[in-house]
């Protein structure tokens, strides 16, 4: 089914990127985020991962925000230090505010452990924005993964299938809306 879904999807009209992978680099870039990027790319899904899509000289927020606004689906890889990153929380908030479909992956962390921390450097308005996005993501059906006793290949299969299914559903919704106009 996966190969068929990917083949069907490749034939569709696509935005600047299909999926934006939101992650905490130190926790996940060399494992789940990077592996998922590679798997989706091999399936023909255009994915955005900062280390793969950006080059020296790119303005972080400009490039990242453009990737988020241009994608159809977001994958938020939550990890133990995710909430320590302003960038992760900014990306998640923008994904949620722009009404993107977001697939949460809880990597070595439970949703209840994810809390926005006030370290005194972030304006209250931003803290509220980040907290609202995090709460919305925590109450979205996602995948959980404990790296100490789960099979990586199963996680990658499940995550890539979730991305493909969401992309196909969005395409069907787009076609239905187009047919009504």
Image (tube, rainbow, N blue to C red):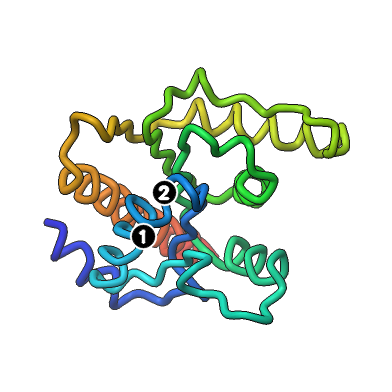
Residue 58 placement: quadrant: bottom right
Left or right side of 105 for 156: left
How many other residues sit within 10 Å of disc 2, few (<14), some (14-19) or many (≥20)?
some
Residue 27 horizontal/vertical position (percent): 45, 45
Which label is found at residue 34? Answer: 1
Residue 107 against residue 37 in the figure, above or below: above
As helix, strand or loop, the secondary structure at mark 2 comes to: helix
From this view, report whether residue 106 is shown above or below residue 21: above
Q: Classify 174 as above or below 126.
A: below
What x and y, as percent, mark residue 4? 14, 65
The x, y position of residue 5, in whole percent, is 20, 62
Residue 117 appears left or right of 165: right
Give the label on residue 28, or none. 2
Asked if residue 115 is positioned above or below residue 10 in the image, the reply reads above
Q: Horizontal and vertical percent for residue 21?
A: 46, 56
Residue appearing at x 52%, y 47% in the figure = 24
> For mark 1, does the 10 Å Cα neighbourhood hold few (<14), some (14 to 19), or many (20 or more) residues?
some
* Whether label 1 touches label 2, CB < 8 Å: yes
Residue in the foreground of this view, choosing between 45 and 179? 45
Residue depicted at x 68% and y 67%: 60
Residue shown at 23% from the left, 66% from the top? 6
For image coordinates 81% across by 39% down, the residue present is 126
Give the secondary structure at mark 1.
helix
């Amino acid at each position: 089914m996966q190969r068929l879904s990917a083949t069907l999807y490749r034939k569709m009209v696509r935005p600047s990127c299909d999926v934006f992978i939101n992650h905490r680099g130190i926790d996940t870039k060399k494992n789940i985020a990077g592996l998922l990027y590679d798997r989706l790319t091999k399936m023909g899904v255009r994915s955005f991962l900062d280390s793969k899509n950006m080059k020296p000289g790119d303005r972080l927020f400009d490039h990242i925000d453009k990737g988020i606004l241009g994608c159809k689906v977001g994958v938020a890889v939550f990890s133990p230090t995710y909430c320590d990153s302003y960038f992760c929380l900014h990306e998640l908030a923008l994904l949620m505010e722009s009404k993107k479909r977001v697939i949460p992956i809880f990597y070595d962390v439970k949703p209840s452990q994810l809390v926005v921390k006030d370290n005194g450097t972030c304006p209250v308005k931003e803290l509220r924005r980040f907290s609202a996005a995090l709460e919305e993501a925590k109450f979205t059906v996602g995948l959980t993964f404990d790296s100490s006793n789960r099979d990586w290949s199963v996680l990658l299969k499940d995550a890539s299938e979730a991305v493909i299914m969401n992309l196909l559903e969005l395409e069907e919704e787009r076609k239905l809306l187009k047919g009504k106009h």
